[in-house]
């Protein structure tokens, strides 16, 4: 994998395989190297082996919540950006204790708009639009 590709590697974590695959297609079409995960434990193992540039995760996952996944990924890869998604913005209340510990994560409301998603990803990666 080229360095340019690794600079734009994104892990997409959503318990609904069709959602994960749709987001991967959108991100791939936008020029990113996106990998789908339907299990947050598998995503965490992969991040420990080869950290992505960004993790896009559903806040409400069955085994490890997206919020806990974000904290764990940041501990093994401090430069990794995190963007959480939630169909119920009441999930934001779960971020309170994490913020108190110094973890700040942005949350996008589902359903995601394609332009909003790509714009936020581009902003978080901070390297401009990939080639």
Image (tube, rainbow, N blue to C red):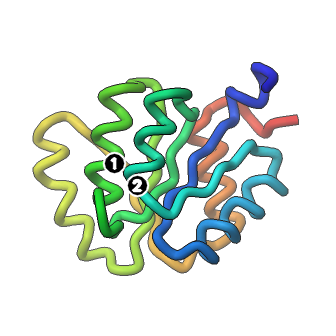
Q: Which residue is mark 1?
A: 69
In the image, taking residue 74 as reference, residue 8 lies left or right, namely: right
Disc 2 is placed on an element classified as helix
Residue 128's disc number: none
Q: Residues within 10 Å of mark 1 (few under 14, many from 20)?
A: many
Question: Where the N terminus falls, by quadrant?
Answer: top right
The answer to which of 11 and 32 lies nearer the viewer is: 11
Residue 129: name its quadrant.
top right
At x 76%, y 19%, the residue is 3
Q: Is residue 20 left or right of residue 4?
A: left
Quick check: 25 left or right of 11?
A: right
Q: Residue placed at 49% from the left, 76% from the top?
A: 110
Query: Where does residue 26 sit, x and y in percent of width and height?
Result: 75, 63
Q: Which residue is mark 2?
A: 40
Looking at the image, is mark 1 or mark 2 nearer the viewer? 2
Q: Position of residue 62 (x, y in %)?
A: 31, 69
Q: Earlier in the sequence, mark 1 or mark 2?
A: 2
**Furthest residue toward right:** 131
Q: Relative to residue 85, is residue 96 depicted above or below?
A: above
- Callout 2 crowding tier (Cα within 10 Å): few <14, some 14–19, many ≥20: many
Return the residue nearer the eye: 34 or 85. 34
Q: Are marks 1 and 2 in contact (CB under 8 Å)?
A: yes
In the displayed structure, would residue 81 be above or below residue 62?
Answer: above
């Amino acid at each position: 994998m080229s360095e340019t590709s690794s600079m734009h590697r994104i892990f997409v974590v959503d318990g609904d395989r069709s959602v994960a695959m749709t987001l991967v297609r959108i991100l791939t079409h936008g020029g990113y190297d996106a990998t789908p995960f339907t299990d947050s434990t598998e995503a965490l193992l992969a991040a420990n082996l080869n950290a992505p540039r960004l993790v896009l995760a559903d806040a409400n996952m069955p085994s490890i919540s997206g919020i806990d996944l974000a904290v764990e990924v940041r501990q093994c890869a401090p430069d990794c950006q995190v963007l959480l998604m939630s169909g119920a913005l009441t999930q934001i209340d779960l971020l309170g204790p994490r913020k108190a510990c110094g973890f700040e994560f942005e949350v996008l409301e589902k359903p995601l708009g394609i332009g909003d998603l790509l714009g936020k990803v581009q902003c978080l990666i901070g390297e401009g639009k990939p080639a």
